[in-house]
Amino acid sequence: MATRSSRKTTTRRKSSPRQATSAKKRPAAAPTVPTIPPGQRVWLLELPWGGLGGGTPARVTYYKALTAHAYVGTALPSPLEPYASKPYSYLRWLEDELNGSEGPGATAAPMTLRPEQRADVDAIVAAAQREFRQVHLANDVGTGKTLVAVAAAKAIAKLGGARTILVTVDRPARITIPSWRRTIAALGSEDPCDDDLRWIIMSSDSLGKLMARNGRPRLTVDVAVIDEAHQFRHASKRTSYMRRLTRMDGPHEKSPFVLTITATPGHHPGEWGYLSSLYARVHGDPPAEWSDFGRALAERGVPLETSYGKWTWTAEAKESLPMQQAAIGDVRDILLRHDPPLMLTRSAPRGPPPFDVDLVELTPDQWRAYELEWGDFQREMQLARTGNNVARGLAALVRLRQKASMIRVEHTVAAAKAELERGYQVLIATEMVSTAAHPVAELLEADGIPVARIYGSNPQAESERMRFQRGEAPVVVFNTPTAINLQAREQFADGTFATDTPRRGFFHQARYSGLLAEQTMGRAHRNNQVCSWSLFMQ
Protein backbone atom coordinates (compact mmCIF):
# COMPACT_ATOMS: atom_id res chain seq x y z
CA MET A 1 0.00 0.00 0.00
CA ALA A 2 1.45 3.27 -1.03
CA THR A 3 1.76 5.99 1.66
CA ARG A 4 1.83 9.76 1.21
CA SER A 5 5.03 11.37 2.37
CA SER A 6 4.67 13.41 5.62
CA ARG A 7 7.15 16.02 4.36
CA LYS A 8 5.34 19.22 3.42
CA THR A 9 6.36 20.91 0.24
CA THR A 10 6.07 24.65 -0.12
CA THR A 11 5.79 26.55 -3.33
CA ARG A 12 7.39 29.99 -3.29
CA ARG A 13 5.37 32.47 -5.28
CA LYS A 14 7.37 34.63 -7.58
CA SER A 15 6.78 38.32 -7.19
CA SER A 16 5.61 40.22 -10.20
CA PRO A 17 7.89 42.83 -11.80
CA ARG A 18 5.55 45.54 -10.50
CA GLN A 19 5.83 44.21 -6.91
CA ALA A 20 9.61 44.00 -7.17
CA THR A 21 9.86 47.58 -8.40
CA SER A 22 7.53 48.73 -5.64
CA ALA A 23 9.65 47.00 -2.99
CA LYS A 24 12.79 48.70 -4.27
CA LYS A 25 11.13 52.12 -4.09
CA ARG A 26 9.68 51.63 -0.59
CA PRO A 27 11.47 54.07 1.75
CA ALA A 28 13.28 52.79 4.80
CA ALA A 29 11.54 53.18 8.13
CA ALA A 30 12.17 56.58 9.71
CA PRO A 31 14.51 56.47 12.71
CA THR A 32 12.77 56.66 16.06
CA VAL A 33 15.51 58.79 17.67
CA PRO A 34 18.10 61.20 16.24
CA THR A 35 21.55 59.99 15.18
CA ILE A 36 24.25 62.05 16.92
CA PRO A 37 27.64 62.21 15.15
CA PRO A 38 30.80 62.43 17.29
CA GLY A 39 31.41 65.92 18.68
CA GLN A 40 27.78 66.97 18.30
CA ARG A 41 24.67 66.80 20.49
CA VAL A 42 20.92 66.86 20.11
CA TRP A 43 18.57 69.58 21.31
CA LEU A 44 14.89 68.74 21.75
CA LEU A 45 12.64 71.67 20.93
CA GLU A 46 9.17 72.83 21.92
CA LEU A 47 8.16 74.39 18.64
CA PRO A 48 4.74 76.03 18.27
CA TRP A 49 2.04 74.19 16.37
CA GLY A 50 2.76 74.52 12.66
CA GLY A 51 6.44 75.34 13.15
CA LEU A 52 8.05 78.76 12.83
CA GLY A 53 6.67 81.04 10.15
CA GLY A 54 4.40 78.26 8.94
CA GLY A 55 7.12 75.67 8.48
CA THR A 56 9.83 73.60 10.13
CA PRO A 57 13.30 75.22 10.34
CA ALA A 58 16.22 73.71 8.44
CA ARG A 59 17.88 70.67 10.03
CA VAL A 60 14.99 70.28 12.46
CA THR A 61 13.16 66.95 12.37
CA TYR A 62 10.06 65.77 14.17
CA TYR A 63 10.36 62.38 15.93
CA LYS A 64 7.06 60.75 16.67
CA ALA A 65 8.54 58.42 19.29
CA LEU A 66 9.75 61.46 21.24
CA THR A 67 6.73 63.64 20.39
CA ALA A 68 9.23 66.46 19.89
CA HIS A 69 11.31 68.21 17.25
CA ALA A 70 15.09 67.80 17.39
CA TYR A 71 18.13 69.66 16.11
CA VAL A 72 21.53 67.96 15.87
CA GLY A 73 24.75 69.96 15.63
CA THR A 74 27.65 71.48 17.51
CA ALA A 75 25.64 74.49 18.72
CA LEU A 76 21.98 75.46 18.74
CA PRO A 77 21.23 78.35 16.33
CA SER A 78 20.13 81.48 18.17
CA PRO A 79 16.65 81.61 16.50
CA LEU A 80 15.92 78.21 18.06
CA GLU A 81 17.15 79.04 21.57
CA PRO A 82 13.73 80.25 22.83
CA TYR A 83 12.31 76.80 22.00
CA ALA A 84 15.04 74.73 23.68
CA SER A 85 14.03 72.33 26.43
CA LYS A 86 13.84 73.89 29.89
CA PRO A 87 15.85 72.68 32.89
CA TYR A 88 14.05 70.00 34.93
CA SER A 89 11.49 69.31 32.20
CA TYR A 90 10.71 65.83 30.87
CA LEU A 91 11.89 67.01 27.46
CA ARG A 92 15.27 67.86 28.98
CA TRP A 93 15.32 64.45 30.69
CA LEU A 94 14.86 62.77 27.29
CA GLU A 95 17.49 65.05 25.76
CA ASP A 96 20.01 64.15 28.46
CA GLU A 97 19.30 60.44 27.91
CA LEU A 98 19.99 60.78 24.19
CA ASN A 99 23.21 62.76 24.71
CA GLY A 100 24.48 60.63 27.57
CA SER A 101 25.25 63.78 29.55
CA GLU A 102 23.22 66.38 31.39
CA GLY A 103 22.59 69.91 30.24
CA PRO A 104 22.90 72.91 32.56
CA GLY A 105 20.39 73.37 35.35
CA ALA A 106 18.50 76.55 36.20
CA THR A 107 19.98 79.48 38.09
CA ALA A 108 18.33 81.68 40.70
CA ALA A 109 19.22 83.94 43.59
CA PRO A 110 19.76 81.81 46.72
CA MET A 111 16.95 81.40 49.25
CA THR A 112 17.22 80.26 52.86
CA LEU A 113 14.77 78.39 55.04
CA ARG A 114 13.27 79.95 58.13
CA PRO A 115 13.73 78.03 61.41
CA GLU A 116 10.20 76.60 61.32
CA GLN A 117 10.70 75.45 57.72
CA ARG A 118 13.95 73.73 58.68
CA ALA A 119 12.08 71.98 61.51
CA ASP A 120 9.51 70.69 59.00
CA VAL A 121 12.29 69.39 56.73
CA ASP A 122 13.84 67.55 59.69
CA ALA A 123 10.47 65.97 60.56
CA ILE A 124 9.97 64.73 56.99
CA VAL A 125 13.49 63.30 56.81
CA ALA A 126 12.99 61.60 60.20
CA ALA A 127 9.97 59.73 58.81
CA ALA A 128 11.97 58.66 55.76
CA GLN A 129 14.78 57.41 58.00
CA ARG A 130 12.21 55.27 59.82
CA GLU A 131 11.33 53.81 56.39
CA PHE A 132 7.89 55.34 56.08
CA ARG A 133 6.96 55.71 52.44
CA GLN A 134 5.09 59.02 52.62
CA VAL A 135 4.51 62.23 54.57
CA HIS A 136 1.73 64.74 54.00
CA LEU A 137 2.57 68.45 54.27
CA ALA A 138 -0.65 70.31 55.12
CA ASN A 139 0.69 73.61 56.43
CA ASP A 140 -1.45 76.70 55.87
CA VAL A 141 -1.50 78.39 52.48
CA GLY A 142 1.50 80.67 51.99
CA THR A 143 3.77 79.25 54.70
CA GLY A 144 6.49 78.27 52.23
CA LYS A 145 5.66 74.62 51.59
CA THR A 146 7.53 74.66 48.27
CA LEU A 147 10.82 75.53 49.97
CA VAL A 148 10.25 72.81 52.56
CA ALA A 149 9.41 70.25 49.88
CA VAL A 150 12.48 70.93 47.75
CA ALA A 151 14.83 70.85 50.74
CA ALA A 152 13.25 67.64 52.07
CA ALA A 153 13.31 65.91 48.67
CA LYS A 154 17.02 66.72 48.25
CA ALA A 155 17.85 65.41 51.72
CA ILE A 156 15.84 62.21 51.27
CA ALA A 157 17.35 61.55 47.84
CA LYS A 158 20.85 61.81 49.27
CA LEU A 159 19.86 59.72 52.26
CA GLY A 160 18.82 56.78 50.10
CA GLY A 161 21.15 57.27 47.15
CA ALA A 162 18.22 58.27 44.94
CA ARG A 163 18.62 60.15 41.69
CA THR A 164 15.30 60.93 39.98
CA ILE A 165 12.83 63.29 41.66
CA LEU A 166 9.40 63.82 40.08
CA VAL A 167 7.41 66.97 40.93
CA THR A 168 3.77 67.23 39.82
CA VAL A 169 2.20 70.70 39.79
CA ASP A 170 -1.19 72.24 39.24
CA ARG A 171 -2.25 74.51 36.38
CA PRO A 172 -1.38 76.96 34.90
CA ALA A 173 1.84 75.14 34.07
CA ARG A 174 3.36 78.28 32.50
CA ILE A 175 3.42 79.78 36.00
CA THR A 176 3.69 76.82 38.37
CA ILE A 177 6.57 75.05 36.61
CA PRO A 178 8.84 78.16 36.52
CA SER A 179 8.06 78.75 40.19
CA TRP A 180 9.23 75.27 41.17
CA ARG A 181 12.24 75.53 38.83
CA ARG A 182 13.24 78.77 40.55
CA THR A 183 12.96 77.21 44.01
CA ILE A 184 15.01 74.13 43.05
CA ALA A 185 17.72 76.36 41.63
CA ALA A 186 17.60 78.70 44.63
CA LEU A 187 18.29 75.80 47.02
CA GLY A 188 20.87 74.16 44.74
CA SER A 189 24.63 74.32 45.05
CA GLU A 190 27.14 75.80 42.62
CA ASP A 191 27.28 72.40 40.90
CA PRO A 192 25.67 72.94 37.45
CA CYS A 193 24.22 69.44 37.60
CA ASP A 194 22.40 70.33 40.83
CA ASP A 195 24.05 67.84 43.17
CA ASP A 196 23.74 65.06 40.58
CA LEU A 197 19.96 64.90 41.10
CA ARG A 198 17.64 64.65 38.12
CA TRP A 199 14.46 66.64 38.59
CA ILE A 200 11.37 66.33 36.40
CA ILE A 201 8.65 68.94 36.90
CA MET A 202 5.36 68.16 35.16
CA SER A 203 1.80 69.37 35.17
CA SER A 204 -0.55 66.72 36.51
CA ASP A 205 -2.35 66.89 33.14
CA SER A 206 0.85 65.76 31.36
CA LEU A 207 1.62 62.66 33.43
CA GLY A 208 0.43 60.46 30.56
CA LYS A 209 3.70 61.29 28.78
CA LEU A 210 5.51 59.24 31.41
CA MET A 211 3.44 56.12 30.68
CA ALA A 212 4.38 53.52 28.08
CA ARG A 213 1.82 51.82 25.82
CA ASN A 214 1.65 48.85 28.18
CA GLY A 215 0.49 51.16 30.96
CA ARG A 216 3.74 51.04 32.89
CA PRO A 217 5.93 54.06 33.75
CA ARG A 218 8.69 54.91 31.28
CA LEU A 219 11.07 55.78 34.11
CA THR A 220 11.77 54.84 37.71
CA VAL A 221 10.88 57.55 40.20
CA ASP A 222 12.94 57.57 43.40
CA VAL A 223 11.26 60.50 45.16
CA ALA A 224 7.91 62.07 44.22
CA VAL A 225 6.62 65.48 45.31
CA ILE A 226 2.88 65.77 44.65
CA ASP A 227 1.93 69.45 44.91
CA GLU A 228 -1.72 70.50 45.32
CA ALA A 229 -2.48 66.86 46.04
CA HIS A 230 -6.23 67.54 46.28
CA GLN A 231 -6.16 67.36 42.44
CA PHE A 232 -6.02 63.59 42.90
CA ARG A 233 -8.94 63.22 45.29
CA HIS A 234 -11.22 61.70 42.62
CA ALA A 235 -10.80 58.80 40.22
CA SER A 236 -9.41 60.11 36.93
CA LYS A 237 -6.70 59.40 34.37
CA ARG A 238 -4.20 61.67 36.07
CA THR A 239 -4.94 60.04 39.43
CA SER A 240 -4.35 56.62 37.88
CA TYR A 241 -1.06 57.80 36.34
CA MET A 242 0.11 59.29 39.63
CA ARG A 243 -0.66 56.11 41.55
CA ARG A 244 1.22 53.98 39.03
CA LEU A 245 4.24 56.30 38.92
CA THR A 246 4.49 56.26 42.71
CA ARG A 247 3.62 52.55 42.92
CA MET A 248 0.99 53.43 45.49
CA ASP A 249 -0.61 49.99 45.54
CA GLY A 250 2.73 48.15 45.54
CA PRO A 251 4.87 46.85 48.41
CA HIS A 252 6.17 49.52 50.76
CA GLU A 253 9.79 48.49 50.39
CA LYS A 254 9.69 48.87 46.58
CA SER A 255 7.97 52.25 46.43
CA PRO A 256 9.52 55.71 46.07
CA PHE A 257 9.26 58.18 48.91
CA VAL A 258 6.24 60.42 48.32
CA LEU A 259 5.69 63.88 49.76
CA THR A 260 2.11 65.05 49.18
CA ILE A 261 1.35 68.74 49.65
CA THR A 262 -1.89 70.65 50.10
CA ALA A 263 -3.39 72.87 52.77
CA THR A 264 -6.88 71.81 51.61
CA PRO A 265 -6.86 68.00 51.50
CA GLY A 266 -10.53 67.54 50.61
CA HIS A 267 -14.11 68.17 51.65
CA HIS A 268 -14.16 64.97 53.72
CA PRO A 269 -11.78 62.07 54.50
CA GLY A 270 -13.11 59.97 51.61
CA GLU A 271 -11.30 62.38 49.26
CA TRP A 272 -7.89 61.69 50.79
CA GLY A 273 -7.25 58.68 48.56
CA TYR A 274 -3.78 59.96 47.62
CA LEU A 275 -2.80 58.99 51.19
CA SER A 276 -4.08 55.41 50.89
CA SER A 277 -0.72 53.64 51.00
CA LEU A 278 0.31 55.68 54.04
CA TYR A 279 -2.81 54.66 55.97
CA ALA A 280 -2.23 51.06 54.88
CA ARG A 281 1.27 51.22 56.31
CA VAL A 282 0.07 52.66 59.62
CA HIS A 283 -2.61 49.98 59.93
CA GLY A 284 -0.25 47.19 58.88
CA ASP A 285 -2.36 46.29 55.82
CA PRO A 286 -1.36 45.53 52.21
CA PRO A 287 -1.55 48.77 50.19
CA ALA A 288 -4.06 47.26 47.75
CA GLU A 289 -6.52 46.85 50.62
CA TRP A 290 -6.75 50.66 50.84
CA SER A 291 -6.88 51.41 47.11
CA ASP A 292 -10.62 52.12 47.50
CA PHE A 293 -9.96 54.61 50.26
CA GLY A 294 -13.56 55.56 51.01
CA ARG A 295 -14.57 51.92 51.38
CA ALA A 296 -11.64 51.22 53.73
CA LEU A 297 -12.65 54.16 55.93
CA ALA A 298 -16.35 53.24 55.88
CA GLU A 299 -15.48 49.69 56.98
CA ARG A 300 -13.66 51.21 59.96
CA GLY A 301 -16.64 53.29 61.08
CA VAL A 302 -16.19 56.61 59.25
CA PRO A 303 -19.69 57.87 58.24
CA LEU A 304 -19.24 57.69 54.46
CA GLU A 305 -21.32 56.21 51.64
CA THR A 306 -21.16 56.12 47.85
CA SER A 307 -23.22 58.48 45.70
CA TYR A 308 -22.93 58.59 41.90
CA GLY A 309 -19.65 56.69 42.08
CA LYS A 310 -18.06 59.02 44.68
CA TRP A 311 -17.76 58.77 48.43
CA THR A 312 -19.62 61.37 50.46
CA TRP A 313 -21.01 61.84 53.97
CA THR A 314 -23.87 59.62 55.03
CA ALA A 315 -27.30 61.24 55.36
CA GLU A 316 -26.90 61.36 59.14
CA ALA A 317 -23.46 62.99 58.92
CA LYS A 318 -24.72 65.60 56.43
CA GLU A 319 -27.16 66.80 59.10
CA SER A 320 -24.53 66.93 61.86
CA LEU A 321 -21.51 69.21 61.64
CA PRO A 322 -20.11 67.87 64.95
CA MET A 323 -20.22 64.33 63.51
CA GLN A 324 -18.31 65.49 60.42
CA GLN A 325 -15.69 67.33 62.48
CA ALA A 326 -15.23 64.35 64.78
CA ALA A 327 -14.73 61.99 61.82
CA ILE A 328 -12.24 64.34 60.16
CA GLY A 329 -10.34 64.66 63.44
CA ASP A 330 -10.21 60.89 63.98
CA VAL A 331 -8.84 60.19 60.51
CA ARG A 332 -6.40 63.12 60.52
CA ASP A 333 -5.05 62.39 64.00
CA ILE A 334 -3.92 58.90 63.00
CA LEU A 335 -1.17 60.62 61.01
CA LEU A 336 -0.84 63.84 62.97
CA ARG A 337 -0.16 62.13 66.32
CA HIS A 338 1.91 59.30 64.94
CA ASP A 339 5.51 58.89 66.09
CA PRO A 340 7.13 60.18 63.94
CA PRO A 341 4.37 62.54 62.70
CA LEU A 342 3.27 61.65 59.18
CA MET A 343 1.20 64.79 58.63
CA LEU A 344 2.44 68.33 59.30
CA THR A 345 -0.08 71.13 59.90
CA ARG A 346 1.64 74.39 60.74
CA SER A 347 -0.57 77.47 61.05
CA ALA A 348 0.42 80.72 59.33
CA PRO A 349 1.77 83.24 61.85
CA ARG A 350 -0.21 86.03 60.18
CA GLY A 351 -3.52 84.24 60.80
CA PRO A 352 -6.35 83.64 58.28
CA PRO A 353 -7.10 86.30 55.64
CA PRO A 354 -9.53 89.03 56.76
CA PHE A 355 -12.79 88.31 54.93
CA ASP A 356 -16.08 90.18 54.59
CA VAL A 357 -19.20 90.24 52.43
CA ASP A 358 -19.95 93.48 50.56
CA LEU A 359 -23.55 93.98 49.46
CA VAL A 360 -24.10 95.42 45.99
CA GLU A 361 -26.92 97.95 45.61
CA LEU A 362 -28.44 97.35 42.20
CA THR A 363 -30.24 100.00 40.17
CA PRO A 364 -33.97 99.48 39.48
CA ASP A 365 -33.19 98.30 35.94
CA GLN A 366 -30.57 95.89 37.24
CA TRP A 367 -33.00 94.54 39.84
CA ARG A 368 -35.64 93.93 37.16
CA ALA A 369 -33.09 92.10 35.02
CA TYR A 370 -31.96 90.01 37.99
CA GLU A 371 -35.50 89.16 39.13
CA LEU A 372 -36.39 88.13 35.58
CA GLU A 373 -33.43 85.78 35.48
CA TRP A 374 -34.25 84.53 38.98
CA GLY A 375 -37.78 83.67 37.87
CA ASP A 376 -36.48 81.80 34.84
CA PHE A 377 -34.04 79.94 37.11
CA GLN A 378 -36.80 78.89 39.51
CA ARG A 379 -38.98 77.58 36.67
CA GLU A 380 -36.09 75.64 35.11
CA MET A 381 -35.10 74.14 38.46
CA GLN A 382 -38.67 73.05 39.15
CA LEU A 383 -38.85 71.36 35.75
CA ALA A 384 -35.47 69.76 36.33
CA ARG A 385 -36.55 68.38 39.70
CA THR A 386 -39.87 67.12 38.34
CA GLY A 387 -38.16 65.32 35.50
CA ASN A 388 -35.09 64.37 37.54
CA ASN A 389 -32.94 66.08 34.87
CA VAL A 390 -29.63 66.95 36.53
CA ALA A 391 -28.14 68.45 33.36
CA ARG A 392 -31.07 70.83 32.95
CA GLY A 393 -30.68 72.03 36.53
CA LEU A 394 -26.95 72.61 36.12
CA ALA A 395 -27.53 74.55 32.89
CA ALA A 396 -30.07 76.78 34.65
CA LEU A 397 -27.63 77.42 37.48
CA VAL A 398 -24.83 78.37 35.08
CA ARG A 399 -27.11 80.78 33.20
CA LEU A 400 -28.15 82.49 36.44
CA ARG A 401 -24.54 82.89 37.56
CA GLN A 402 -23.58 84.30 34.15
CA LYS A 403 -26.37 86.89 34.17
CA ALA A 404 -25.78 87.87 37.80
CA SER A 405 -22.07 88.20 37.08
CA MET A 406 -22.68 90.56 34.16
CA ILE A 407 -24.98 92.72 36.28
CA ARG A 408 -22.26 93.16 38.94
CA VAL A 409 -19.39 94.07 36.57
CA GLU A 410 -19.59 97.84 36.98
CA HIS A 411 -19.84 97.49 40.77
CA THR A 412 -16.68 95.38 40.91
CA VAL A 413 -14.85 97.87 38.71
CA ALA A 414 -15.95 100.77 40.92
CA ALA A 415 -14.74 98.97 44.06
CA ALA A 416 -11.39 98.19 42.43
CA LYS A 417 -10.89 101.83 41.40
CA ALA A 418 -11.66 102.98 44.94
CA GLU A 419 -9.02 100.65 46.40
CA LEU A 420 -6.46 101.79 43.82
CA GLU A 421 -7.03 105.36 45.00
CA ARG A 422 -6.37 104.20 48.57
CA GLY A 423 -2.94 102.93 47.52
CA TYR A 424 -3.60 99.17 47.02
CA GLN A 425 -2.91 96.76 44.20
CA VAL A 426 -6.13 94.88 43.51
CA LEU A 427 -6.87 91.22 42.83
CA ILE A 428 -10.21 90.30 41.24
CA ALA A 429 -11.02 86.60 41.38
CA THR A 430 -13.52 85.15 38.92
CA GLU A 431 -14.53 81.67 37.83
CA MET A 432 -16.05 82.24 34.41
CA VAL A 433 -14.24 83.99 31.57
CA SER A 434 -16.62 85.46 28.98
CA THR A 435 -19.21 86.71 31.50
CA ALA A 436 -16.83 87.73 34.28
CA ALA A 437 -13.09 87.99 33.65
CA HIS A 438 -13.30 89.56 30.17
CA PRO A 439 -15.91 92.26 30.88
CA VAL A 440 -14.26 93.27 34.19
CA ALA A 441 -10.82 93.56 32.58
CA GLU A 442 -12.15 95.41 29.53
CA LEU A 443 -14.12 97.96 31.57
CA LEU A 444 -11.06 98.70 33.73
CA GLU A 445 -8.83 99.10 30.69
CA ALA A 446 -11.43 101.37 29.06
CA ASP A 447 -10.85 103.68 32.04
CA GLY A 448 -7.11 103.64 31.34
CA ILE A 449 -6.17 101.16 34.11
CA PRO A 450 -3.67 98.47 33.01
CA VAL A 451 -4.88 94.96 33.88
CA ALA A 452 -2.91 91.73 34.10
CA ARG A 453 -5.00 88.82 32.80
CA ILE A 454 -4.40 85.34 34.20
CA TYR A 455 -7.33 83.30 32.96
CA GLY A 456 -8.36 81.08 30.09
CA SER A 457 -5.49 79.57 28.12
CA ASN A 458 -3.37 82.72 28.03
CA PRO A 459 0.14 81.62 26.90
CA GLN A 460 1.56 84.81 28.46
CA ALA A 461 0.28 83.98 31.94
CA GLU A 462 3.69 84.27 33.61
CA SER A 463 4.55 87.59 31.96
CA GLU A 464 1.09 88.86 32.94
CA ARG A 465 1.74 87.78 36.53
CA MET A 466 5.04 89.64 36.49
CA ARG A 467 3.34 92.80 35.18
CA PHE A 468 1.17 92.78 38.29
CA GLN A 469 3.97 91.82 40.66
CA ARG A 470 6.26 94.57 39.37
CA GLY A 471 3.46 97.14 39.56
CA GLU A 472 3.19 97.71 35.81
CA ALA A 473 -0.46 96.63 36.02
CA PRO A 474 -2.07 97.63 39.33
CA VAL A 475 -4.97 95.17 38.87
CA VAL A 476 -4.95 91.45 38.15
CA VAL A 477 -8.06 89.54 37.02
CA PHE A 478 -7.58 85.80 37.48
CA ASN A 479 -9.39 82.50 37.84
CA THR A 480 -6.42 80.38 38.90
CA PRO A 481 -7.03 79.32 42.53
CA THR A 482 -3.75 77.53 43.25
CA ALA A 483 0.00 77.55 42.83
CA ILE A 484 0.66 81.15 41.77
CA ASN A 485 2.15 83.98 43.84
CA LEU A 486 0.57 87.42 43.82
CA GLN A 487 1.70 88.62 47.24
CA ALA A 488 3.75 91.70 48.01
CA ARG A 489 7.53 91.34 48.38
CA GLU A 490 7.82 88.06 46.49
CA GLN A 491 11.48 87.27 45.73
CA PHE A 492 12.16 86.59 42.05
CA ALA A 493 14.81 84.36 40.51
CA ASP A 494 17.11 87.30 39.79
CA GLY A 495 17.09 88.37 43.44
CA THR A 496 14.74 91.33 42.97
CA PHE A 497 11.38 91.62 44.69
CA ALA A 498 7.75 92.32 43.85
CA THR A 499 6.31 95.65 44.92
CA ASP A 500 5.66 96.13 48.61
CA THR A 501 2.30 97.77 47.83
CA PRO A 502 -0.39 96.10 50.01
CA ARG A 503 -2.84 93.85 48.17
CA ARG A 504 -6.65 93.92 48.30
CA GLY A 505 -8.78 91.10 46.95
CA PHE A 506 -12.35 90.83 45.64
CA PHE A 507 -14.40 87.77 44.68
CA HIS A 508 -16.43 88.87 41.69
CA GLN A 509 -17.90 85.36 41.66
CA ALA A 510 -18.21 83.10 44.67
CA ARG A 511 -16.56 79.70 44.55
CA TYR A 512 -18.79 76.73 45.31
CA SER A 513 -15.83 74.84 46.71
CA GLY A 514 -14.55 76.06 50.05
CA LEU A 515 -11.21 74.47 49.18
CA LEU A 516 -10.84 76.63 46.06
CA ALA A 517 -12.00 79.76 47.89
CA GLU A 518 -9.36 79.25 50.59
CA GLN A 519 -6.70 78.56 47.97
CA THR A 520 -7.71 81.66 46.00
CA MET A 521 -7.33 83.93 49.02
CA GLY A 522 -3.91 82.40 49.64
CA ARG A 523 -2.56 83.79 46.37
CA ALA A 524 -1.83 87.15 48.04
CA HIS A 525 -2.34 86.40 51.75
CA ARG A 526 0.91 84.47 52.12
CA ASN A 527 4.53 84.64 53.24
CA ASN A 528 3.64 87.04 56.07
CA GLN A 529 1.91 89.44 53.66
CA VAL A 530 -1.69 90.21 54.66
CA CYS A 531 -4.42 90.61 52.03
CA SER A 532 -8.05 91.36 52.94
CA TRP A 533 -10.80 89.83 50.78
CA SER A 534 -14.43 90.70 50.09
CA LEU A 535 -17.23 88.80 48.36
CA PHE A 536 -19.77 90.79 46.36
CA MET A 537 -23.43 89.80 46.78
CA GLN A 538 -26.67 91.48 45.71
Image: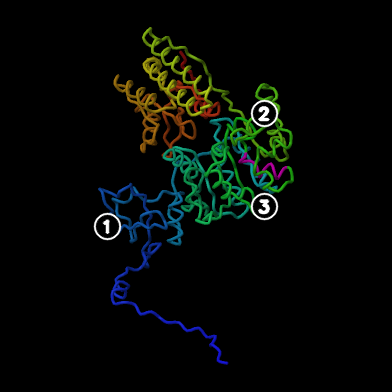
Where does residue 339 sit, x and y in percent of width and height?
73, 40
How far is disc 2 from disc 1 in space, using C-alphas? 63 Å
Q: Which mark is residue 58?
A: 1
User: Are dots 2 and 1 in contact, CB under 8 Å?
Assistant: no
Q: Mark 2 or mark 3: which comes first in sequence?
A: 3
Mark positioned earlier in the residue sequence (2 or 1): 1
Q: Categorize mark 2 by other alpha carbons within 10 Å: few (<14), some (14-19), many (20+).
A: some
Amino acid at circle 1: Ala
**Exactly how many numbered labels are in the figure?**
3
Q: Left or right? Give the position of 377 relative to 315.
A: left
State the mark number for residue 402: none
Main SS, magenta residues: helix
User: In the image, which disc is placed on residue 251?
Assistant: 3
Number of residues whose C-alpha sits closer than 10 Å to that of mark 3, classed few (under 14), some (14–19) or many (20 or more): some
Q: Earlier in the sequence, mark 1 or mark 3?
A: 1
> Residue 16, relative to residue 81: is it above or below?
below
Whether residue 522 is visible to the viewer of this picture, yes or no, is no
> Which quadrant of the figure contains the N terminus?
bottom right
